[in-house]
Image (spheres, rainbow, N blue to C red):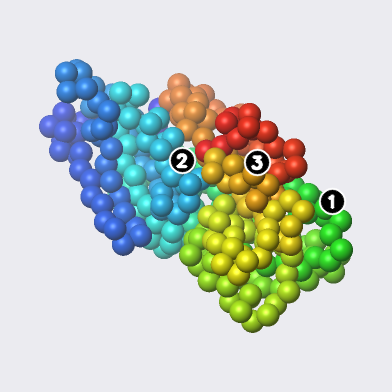
């Protein structure tokens, strides 16, 4: 246990009681306290605040996608007062706003800072501040460009592997030509870099034609507009490579509006990522062709790391890669949809 924690335990109970506060906004960046869990029984005895582990959790907007909603729900269910945590949440799709949230959590003397970074770059300074303040940093969902000495652990998906698995599947389809609309996620994020990098490298190697490559920022409506623009301009394409399910959904809306067939044995191959249950159902109906898994359930891994650190132990494996795979519409089953849909 670090010095900061010892001092915190020794502090007066009145000071500790005064520290519970939270705020939120709807401008794409927000923070909130979850000390009073909505499922808590009014007759339950309140936990002793001087024993709670104080955690600041910085995530992307929960409304960004079905994946992010599931990820946020998983964290909120785990880091509750009943489970021994005083958790506050902050959200933004912008790196600079996330950094501001991180600085505030450090000033508030959290014990742990949990971070899903909007961008891989720009985190060194705030991580050094956290280290100096005795705050342990745990990365989840996304990697960052920082030395491993600046954080305790990283529980992430291998985004490059996700992209390569998808591209290898596409290559195996042996299409007569590859004319691809590439819908990218938020630029600079680990998911975008990994999923884009695999396609860029293979397209260059094999001479695939990238008809349109543009960010839709994980958004279905923006994806629909991009694909509609490609259709209106008369561009020929036979693959939609969307870096998340919502963008694939938007792309399909544009195809449907233009009466362009899609799915197994049809004019356009549709690919997404994240494995939302509704997306896997589109595969099962053979309206889509491929969906790459991205596992949102990281809280149990994070709690194990915190338990290890709280007991005075060290984290043997700093990087934990989530187990993930891809699904093909020709082989997916209802059991897959039930077991892997989020």
Badge nearest the viewer, 2 or 3: 3
Q: Residues within 10 Å of mark 2 (few under 14, many from 20)?
A: some
Q: Earlier in the sequence, mark 2 or mark 3?
A: 2
Per the rendering, the mark at residue 284 is 3
Instruction: Work out whether residue 2 or residue 321 is closer to the camera in this orientation and state it.
Output: 321
Q: 62 left or right of 322?
A: left
**Marks 3 and 1, how far apart at CA:** 20 Å
Residue 314, picture quadrant? top right
Going by the picture, which residue comes out furthest to the front? 259
Q: Position of residue 292 (x, y in %)?
A: 66, 46
Residue 171, picture quadrant? bottom right
**Tag count:** 3
Q: Earlier in the sequence, mark 3 or mark 1?
A: 1
In the picture of the structure, the residue carrying the numbered disc 2 is: 70
Q: 270 left or right of 206?
A: left
Per the rendering, the mark at residue 172 is 1
Residue 205, picture quadrant? bottom right
């Amino acid at each position: 246990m670090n010095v900061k924690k010892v001092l915190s335990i020794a502090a007066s109970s009145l000071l500790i009681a005064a520290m519970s506060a939270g705020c939120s906004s709807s401008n794409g960046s927000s923070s909130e306290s979850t000390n009073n869990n909505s499922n808590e029984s009014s007759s339950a005895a309140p936990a002793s605040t001087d024993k709670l582990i104080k955690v600041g959790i910085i995530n992307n907007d929960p409304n960004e996608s079905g994946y992010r909603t599931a990820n946020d729900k998983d964290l909120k269910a785990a880091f509750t007062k009943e489970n021994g945590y005083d958790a506050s949440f902050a959200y933004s799709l912008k790196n600079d706003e996330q950094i501001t949230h991180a600085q505030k959590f450090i000033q508030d003397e959290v014990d742990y800072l949990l971070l899903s970074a909007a961008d891989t770059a720009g985190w060194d300074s705030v991580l050094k501040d956290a280290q100096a303040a005795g705050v342990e940093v745990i990365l989840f969902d996304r990697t960052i460009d920082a030395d491993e000495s600046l954080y305790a652990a990283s529980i992430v998906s291998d985004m490059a592997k996700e992209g390569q698995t998808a591209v290898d599947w596409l290559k195996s389809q042996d299409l007569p030509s590859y004319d691809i609309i590439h819908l990218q996620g938020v630029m600079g994020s680990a998911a975008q870099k990994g999923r884009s990098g695999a396609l860029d490298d293979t397209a260059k190697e094999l001479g695939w034609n990238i008809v349109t490559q543009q960010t839709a920022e994980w958004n279905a409506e923006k994806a629909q507009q991009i694909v509609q623009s490609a259709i209106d301009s008369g561009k020929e394409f036979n693959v939609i490579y969307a870096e998340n399910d919502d963008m694939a959904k938007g792309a399909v809306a544009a195809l449907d509006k233009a009466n362009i067939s899609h799915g197994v044995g049809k004019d356009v191959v549709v690919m997404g990522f994240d494995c939302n249950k509704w997306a896997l159902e589109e595969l099962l109906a053979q309206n889509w062709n491929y969906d790459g898994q991205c596992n949102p359930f990281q809280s149990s891994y994070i709690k194990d790391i915190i338990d290890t650190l709280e007991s005075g132990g060290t984290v043997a494996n700093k990087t934990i890669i989530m187990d993930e795979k891809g699904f093909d519409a020709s082989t997916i089953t209802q059991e897959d949809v039930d077991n892997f849909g989020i």
